[in-house]
Amino acid sequence: MYYSKIKILVVGLLFSTSILVTSCKGKKDTANTVDTTTTTTPIQSAPAPVEISADDALATGAKDATKDYPGVTATVNNGEITLTGEVQRSSLQNLMQSLQSLKPKKINNQLTIK
């Protein structure tokens, strides 16, 4: 009787081992594989330098931009436009966009808003 229990145990172990071996057949062993793919990151170039217009061009452009806004005076010094005077709140955004398109270093807004 002792030997028959051992035979059943051995047969059961052989059966479960054969099931285990056949069920894993054809699967890759992903635990021991080495990833050989490479990734490249794009090279980022330095940002383009900021373009600042010359004072002559800024003065001419500022004069043209402010001609439609009575009461607004624009002066240019060292790449900076300084605005003085009074302007309507509804007109301020259009004026600032016009002046920004001239590419000054800075716009000093000292305007009084009506």
Image: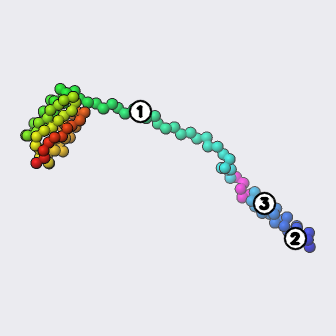
Residue 103 seen in this snapshot:
no
Closer to the camera in the image, 102 or 84: 84
- Which of the 4 image quarters holds residue 58? top left
Few, some or many C-alpha atoms within 10 Å of disc 3 (few <14, some 14-19, many ≥20)?
Answer: few
Q: Residue furthest left?
A: 70
Dominant secondary-structure state across the stretch colored magenta: loop
Q: What residue appears at the point 18 percent right and 40 percent down from the top-left corner?
A: 109
* Residue identifier under label 1: 45
Label 2: state its secondary structure: helix
- Which of the 4 image quarters holds residue 100? top left
**Mark 1 and mark 2: Cα distance apart in space:** 77 Å
Label 3: state its secondary structure: helix
* Residue identifier under label 2: 5
Residue 3 position within the rendered picture, expressed as x and y whole percent measured from the top left: 91, 69
Relative horizontal placement of residue 13, taking residue 76 as reference (left or right): right
Amino acid type, label 1: Ser
Q: What residue appears at the point 13 percent right and 46 percent down from the top-left corner?
A: 113
- Asked if marks 3 and 1 touch (Cβ < 8 Å), the reply is no
Vertical side of 53 occupied by 38: above or below: below
Amino acid type, label 2: Lys
Residue 36 position within the rendered picture, expressed as x and y whole percent measured from the top left: 61, 40
Q: What residue appears at the point 88 percent right and 67 percent down from the top-left corner?
A: 7
Q: Which residues are magenta?
A: 22-26
Q: Earlier in the sequence, mark 3 or mark 1?
A: 3
Q: Residue furthest bottom?
A: 1
* Residue identifier under label 3: 17
Q: Nearer the viewer, mark 1 or mark 2?
A: 1
Vertical side of 64 occupied by 91: above or below: below
Q: Is residue 90 magenta?
A: no
Q: Nearer the viewer, mark 3 or mark 2?
A: 2
Q: Earlier in the sequence, mark 3 or mark 2?
A: 2
Closer to the camera in the image, 72 or 30: 72
